[in-house]
Image: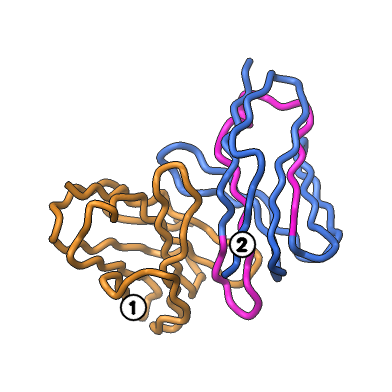
Chain colours: A blue, B orange
Amino acid sequence: TQLLEQSPQFLSIQEGENLTVYCNSSSVFSSLQWYRQEPGEGPVLLVTVVTGGEVKKLKRLTFQFGDARKDSSLHITAAQPGDTGLYLCAGAGFGNEKLTFGTGTRLTIIP
Amino acid sequence: DAGVTQSPTHLIKTRGQQVTLRCSPKSGHDTVSWYQQALGQGPQFIFQYYEEEERQRGNFPDRFSGHQFPNYSSELNVNALLLGDSALYLCASSLDNLGAFFGQGTRLTVV
């Protein structure tokens, strides 16, 4: 069974600070995807990383895929209140599109 | 271009009843997956449909069944509802392993 563990589970920081969310597994995935979910809405895709060691930047967000394709991190620089939400990592299997989701990180940015 | 649409948005059912949830995928997407998201947790994979066939199934009982139509839309049926089936049910459509698009979900409450 593939499992993805995210840490921390909850994070509350001041506006302007930096933060990192981790997503770890003992399984290898064909790709690792990050989503953000607002209350009452479905998850929205932020980024997909495919190659081991890959780094992708999306404005103030930096995503990294581990060399062994088992783990990933999301780093936010100068967090803003609009970054508040539930961040989910999800691993995609090989040859199929089933997603295994992490436990989620609930991020709150305090103005 | 309409994204993934789900209906209904909210539903209240009595224990033992049956429910059908509906999903229209994003235009051009041929694969539909269903997920169950309990409060405070990440989505859990129920099953996936491709070319009107169930391609993969998660760890859910046979009370959960589905269907995909020739136009790629899909239904999720749950029989003999239990209180524990109360959750947000999410439909996602995709073309490949590079990202899924989610609907806003159906909030099912079993009383």
Helix, strand or loop at mark 1: loop
Whichever of callouts 1 and 2 sits on the residue coming sooner in the sequence is: 1
Callout 1 environment at 10 Å: few (<14), some (14 to 19), or many (20+)? some
> What quarter of the picture does the C terminus of chain A occupy?
top right
- Residue A81 lies in the magenta stretch: yes
- Residue B108: percent from left, percent from top: 27, 50
Depth check: B7 or B20 in front?
B20
> What quarter of the picture does the N terminus of chain A occupy?
bottom right
Chain identifier of the residue bearing label 1 in the image? B
**Splitting the image into 4 quarters, where does residue A21 fall?**
top right
Q: Is residue B39 left or right of residue A48?
A: left
Q: What residue is at 13 percent from the left and 52 percent from the top?
A: B14
Identify which amino acid the numbered label 1 is placed on: Phe
Q: Is residue B28 left or right of residue A65?
A: left
Q: Which residue is mark 2?
A: B99
Q: Tags 1 and 2 in contact by the CB under 8 Å rule?
A: no
- Residue A98 lies in the magenta stretch: yes
- Residue A84: percent from left, percent from top: 59, 30
Chain identifier of the residue bearing label 2 in the image? B
Q: What residue is at 29 percent from the left and 50 percent from the top?
A: B86
Identify which amino acid the numbered label 2 is placed on: Gly
Q: What residue is at 30 percent from the left and 67 percent from the top?
A: B76
* Residue segment shown in magenta: A71-100
Q: Which residue is mark 1?
A: B69
Helix, strand or loop at mark 2: loop
**Splitting the image into 4 quarters, where does residue A79 fall?**
top right
- Residue A12: percent from left, percent from top: 63, 25
Residue B35, above or below A85: below
Q: Residue furthest top?
A: A111
